[in-house]
Image (cartoon, helix red, strand yellow):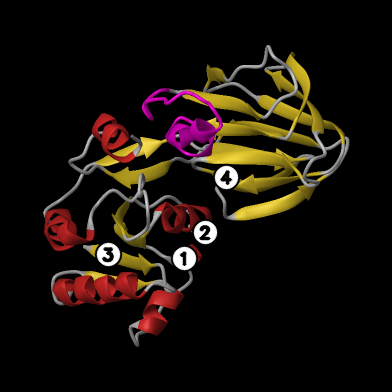
Amino acid sequence: MRVGIVSRCDQKEAIKLAADIAHHLNGRATTTYDECTGHKLGSQGIPLSQMETDVIIAIGGDGTILRILQELKHPIPIIGINVGKVGFLADVSPNNAIPVVDDLLSGFRVSAHSRLSISLNSRRLPPATNEAVIITSQPAHMLEYSIEVDGRVLDTLRADGVIVATSTGSTAYAMSAGGPIVDPRVDAFIIVSLAPYKLSVRPWVVFGESIVKVRITENDAAIVIDGQYNEAVHEADEIIFRKDEQKSLFVIADQSFFVKVMSKLR
């Protein structure tokens, strides 16, 4: 089996755990590192975009996993070992890391999660596994925008911004902004306006095959994708969201989605 090891390189615990896992896998699997992890372990690493493995062990937090998913050339199953804070995507504790690695070598099941394909004025941006956030670039100055779903205007409003999230991302920023928690198996996207100046505005859950368009009508903004990528957005710009052709792949751990919600988000 070919195993990729990617860690959060600025965290000593993550590097130590990467070294322990690499030692445990020695002679049992072909191990590949990303450039930063390889450098820390005194070995040769490769860019994530060039990684060709059967599975990736991500050691860090959810941000580490989202960074990997954005940089991979094509989807590879990922299992996350949490040395961050919440660790909703990285749901294996460091204490269970070695037993989980042993289980991987015996085979594993994969869950495929839909992600967002995003374009800005017809130019493709990185995909989103969790969410894309369009937010005003000037604090205390509201953004004006319209939202269309499948060619029909859903709303036109003034707000601090808007989140378009996947079902997987429903437990991230969208939840904090008042959106619903959605089982990641549900084929849907969530639209949540941020601090809207309108009493009637509520979060929307729309069919996953929908095409969602956000048009900026006044003021400048920024689009932030999975907390990893950001770019300026200007008046009259159009951002279009649709289901991406590829999916994000996660190794299925023992802990169910509902158990994670109850244990990590209460």
Image quarter for residue 163?
A: top right
Which segment did they paint magenta? 166-186
The residue pinned by badge 3 equals 3
Instruction: Please tell me whether residue 135 belongs to the stretch shown in magenta.
Output: no
Among numbered discs 3 and 1, the one appearing first in the sequence: 3
Label 3 sits on a secondary structure element that is strand
Label 1 sits on a secondary structure element that is helix
Whole-angstrom CA distance, mark 4 to mark 1, is 16 Å
Which mark is drawn over residue 221? none
Label 4 sits on a secondary structure element that is strand
Q: Tag 3: Cα neighbours inside 10 Å, few (<14), some, or many (≥20)?
A: many
Whole-angstrom CA distance, mark 2 to mark 4, is 10 Å
Mark 2 near mark 1, Cβ–Cβ under 8 Å? yes
Q: Amino acid at mark 2?
A: Glu
The residue pinned by badge 4 equals 127
Mark 4 near mark 3, Cβ–Cβ under 8 Å? no
Among numbered discs 4 and 3, the one appearing first in the sequence: 3
Q: Is residue 255 visible?
A: yes
Q: Is residue 73 visible?
A: no
Looking at the picture, tell me which residue is in the foreground, 134 or 143: 143
Q: Amino acid at mark 1?
A: Leu
The residue depicted at 45 percent of the width and 76 percent of the height is 35
Looking at the picture, tell me which residue is in the foreground, 205 or 111: 205
The residue depicted at 66 percent of the width and 16 percent of the height is 201
Q: Is residue 240 left or right of residue 179?
A: right
Q: Amino acid at mark 3?
A: Val
Q: Tag 1: Cα neighbours inside 10 Å, few (<14), some, or many (≥20)?
A: some
The residue pinned by badge 1 equals 48
The residue pinned by badge 2 equals 71
Q: Amino acid at mark 4?
A: Pro
